[in-house]
Structures are given as C-alpha cells and as structure tokens.
Amino acid sequence: MNSDKKFHLNLIANSITLHAGLKEVERAAGVAPSESRPVALYSEYAAIAEEGNFTSMFLADTLVAVGSPLAGGGSPEPFTALAAVAARTRNIGLIATGTTSFYEPYNLARLMASLDLISDGRAGWNCVTGALATAAPNFGSDPLPPREERYARADEFLDVVSGLWDRRTLRPNERGGTDLFAEAVNHHGKYFDVEGPLNVAPSRQGRPLVGLAGGSGSQISTAIKHADVVFTNAVSREVAAEYRSEMNQSLVAAGRKPDSIPIMPMIVPFLGATRAEAEERKRSLDMHLEVDAMAPNALANFGISYSYDDVDDPFPVDVLPHPQTVKSTIGGAWGSYRGLYNWIQERPGVTVREVTLQASLGQSHQKFVGSYDDFCDDIELWFREGLAAGFLLMCPEGLESANGFVEHLVPRLIDRGIYRTTPDERPLRERFTCT
Ligand SMILES: Cc1cc2nc3c(=O)[nH]c(=O)nc-3n(C[C@H](O)[C@H](O)[C@H](O)COP(=O)(O)O)c2cc1C
C-alpha cells in the first residue's frame, strides 16, 4: 500500500443518519430538538466535518415519502441543499444522491455540473439505481424494473452524462473572460435520445466525482465502466474481501489495474470511551424502538415476509432463501441481504426482535459497537488489508456522533499515521485518485 494514502472519512448528514430512537432519548434527557432548518443543520455537520479534515459529506435520498408523518421532517432534495452548503464551506466534498431510474440524464448532468461549479470542484454524485420500489408510482405507472434492467439503464444513463460532461471546454476570449465551447452528444439508445450539448461550464475538476452505490455483480460491471469510487454495503471484512476480489477480477478482465477503484463501505458506529459505554448508548436508543410494530415488515425491503407469535420467539430461518439463489432477483441491496443472512446463520436461536433491530438500523448496513480504540483497530485492518479506502459514516446520535468522530476518532487515526493532518484542498475527484 502507498504510505501517502490516507483513510477517507465521509459524513452522512441527512435524517437517514439518525437512529430512530434518538428523538425519544433527547426528549427524556430534556435536550432541545436539534436544529430543524435544514441548511443550518447541514452546515453544522459540514463545519464539524471540515474541522476533522473529512474528505466529504453526503446526502442520501429517496424520491418518495416513507410514511407519514415523515421521520426527519421532510428534508429538501440534495442538489438544492448542497448548493446552499457549498456557499458556507471551503474544502469539504459535497456528495448528492441522484437516481438513474427516475431522472433524465440531461437533467442530472446539468444539476451535478451546477453543484460542481457552485462548489468550485467539490461535487460528487452518489449514483443510485434506487432502493425503493414505492418511488415508481411518482414517475408514471410502470413498476421499478428488476435489478439487471435498472443497471442497463444506469449504464446508458452514465454514457450520456459522461458524454455531456466531457464535451465541454473553456477557452479564453479577447475580452479577458472565458467562453464555453460544448459539443452535442447526439445519443440515440435503448432508453434515451439526447442531443446536447450541456450549457453549464466545467469546474476546475472538469467533471464531478462519480460514486456508484450498490454491491451486486451488476453494480460491479457498471462501476468498472463509469465509477471513480464505489459506495458499498459490505457488512463484514469477509464480505468486503469477496466484493474486492470480484471487483478486481472484473478490473483485470477489462485491462485495468486491480484496486484501481476505491471502495467506501457504509457503517453505523455506536461508540464510547469503553465498549460497555458504547453498548449502553446503543441499548438506550434501541429501547425506544417499537419493535412489535417494526418486526412484521423488517425484511419487506427484500420482499421477504414471515409469521411468528411473539417478537421474542426464535426467528423462522426457513423463510430465508440462500443469497446465491436470489442474487439477481432479491429486492433491496443484495449485499445487505447476504450480510444479514450470514449474521442470522451465525446466531442459532436468534429472535425476531434481534433480527428486526439488525435489519432496520442503518438500513442493514454494517454496525460497529465498541470503544474508539476498538473502532480504530478495526478501521486500520480494513485500510491495511485494502478492503476500504474509507468509510461512509452514519451518525446514529446525530451531531453528538459527528463531534465524537472529530474529538476522539480523528486524533487516534492520525497517531496511527493513516489520516490527514491538514485540509485537502484538491478537487474532490483528485482526492480519490488511486496510484
Ligand atoms: C452505500 C449505499 C448508499 C445507497 N444510497 C441510496 C440512496 O441514497 N437512495 C436510494 O434510493 N438507494 C440507495 N442505495 C441503493 C442502491 O441504489 C441500489 O438500489 C441497491 O444497493 C441495490 O443494488 P445492488 O444489489 O447492486 O446493491 C444505496 C446503496 C448503498 C450500498
């Protein structure tokens, strides 16, 4: 491993980052609810992340209301919100989620290019095929297509977006300014007909960072062609090693160097001065969850239903199909399903309650419960074994989690020589460039 490389930290800043029990814990402790004006709140997360020399912050998104009343209060969509944050920040990378299943490529290319220009080359795209089938009725009557078709559309979508971005140059004019020269793409494909050119100038990084989110084989094939970085749901080092090996085989087959696409898994850390404190923090959040109400639908995202009499009964493991047999058909994220499946198999007698908590918190992404020192040990292993270039950090306790990362985690990572000591002023894409 190149010793100049440092671990990337990315902060997930919108309401998806919070543990669902946090509001009750705050109410019981008499803590005023955190800032509800979104730009003020996101800017607070951004300021903390900049203080900790984080590489980026990230707004996840879905194009559908998940329940009413809406947890999180109804946040603005990411491009608008991050444009406002860009004006209040200096170095932090700004990653906005946009789905290839429901946007049009010209529209998305323009929004991303605008955020990139406004932020002076700090924009990144969390390119998703979309996790929620319930968004489909907001865009016509067709249901969300199966995984392979979603990725086929994403592939063509990314071809068009790249074409629009890459056919732009700025040239000095005789008045001392610059003019944009842009060419048409004239794309005519299975899903899209787009003429172009794009009418937004390139930033100093030329085009925004593209991060493709997912974990399936289809995601890997699409990433090889288009992604600067991948955002994944590897729930353990074992799963991450399999993903990396599959990715490397595909890279080599495409004539590229292994490990040439950085991997950033999502993680939900519950941390404290000691492991016991971290466990207690998580327990005090979990106890406010209405597990009885959540349990029947805990695996609905994967299309799996089951029956039971009591949430403290053993989970009916027979309802779970083996991950390999449903690789292309399972709903939700296949990597998350595989992780959850393994987690359940390793715990004979696990209860419906325990499975519900594991599947629901942080949307079945990897969880870590332990001391800051334990977490540093873990991060160092992921980094040195080449399994992660960095982590997408959820903040289950909101700003308190974010402040804890900066106060307790960052100095420890610096002591181990795997973290930056100064702000990264390079354009976002350059920060992820692999050598
Ligand atoms: C780290 C990560 C972040 C994601 N963020 C979003 C998101 O913000 N919105 C969304 O609709 N889907 C999101 N997804 C879901 C993906 O778009 C994709 O639909 C899902 O992972 C299934 O594809 P897969 O089987 O290749 O994993 C995310 C997935 C991962 C792994």
Image (spheres, grey):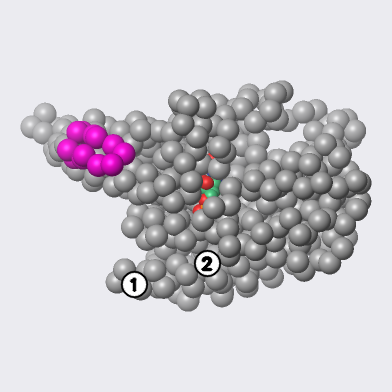
Q: Is residue 195 magenta?
A: yes
| Camera-side residue of 67 and 57 | 67
Q: How many marks?
A: 2
Residue at left 84%, top 51%?
352
319 displayed left or right of 244: right
Tell me if mark 1 has few (under 14), some (14-19) or many (20+) residues whose alpha carbon lies within 10 angstroms of its own.
Answer: few
Identity, as a three-letter code, of the amino acid under mark 1 = Ala
User: Looking at this view, is 79 or 148 the one in front?
Assistant: 148
The residue tagged 2 is 243
Q: Nearer the viewer, residue 143 or 131?
A: 143
Label 2: element kind: helix
Between the C-alphas of marks 1 and 2, the distance is: 15 Å
- Asked if the stretch drawn in magenta spans residue 300, the answer is no
Q: Mark 1 or mark 2: which comes first in sequence?
A: 2
Q: In the rendering, at what x and y percent does residue 1 appear?
A: 47, 76
The amino acid type, in three-letter code, at marker 2 is Tyr
Where does residue 11 sit, x and y in percent of width and height? 59, 47
- x, y percent for residue 353: 85, 50
Q: Locate residue 378 relative to residue 42 in the image: left or right.
A: right
Specify whether residue 425 is in view: no
Quadrant (top left/top right/bottom left/bottom right) for the C terminus: bottom left
Q: Which residue is mark 1?
A: 253
Extreme-left residue of the structure: 174
Q: Is residue 302 left or right of residue 7?
A: right
The residue tagged with tag 1: helix, strand or loop?
Answer: helix
Q: Is mark 2 within 8 Å of ligand 1?
A: no
Please tell me whether residue 5 is drawn above or below residue 270 in the rendered image: below
Residue at x 29%, y 71% (from the top left corner): 255
- The dominant secondary structure in magenta is loop
Q: Which residues are magenta?
A: 185-196
- Residue drawn at (89%, 35%), measured in percent from left and top? 29
Q: For the residue with label 1, is its CB less than 8 Å from the closest atom of ligand 1?
A: no
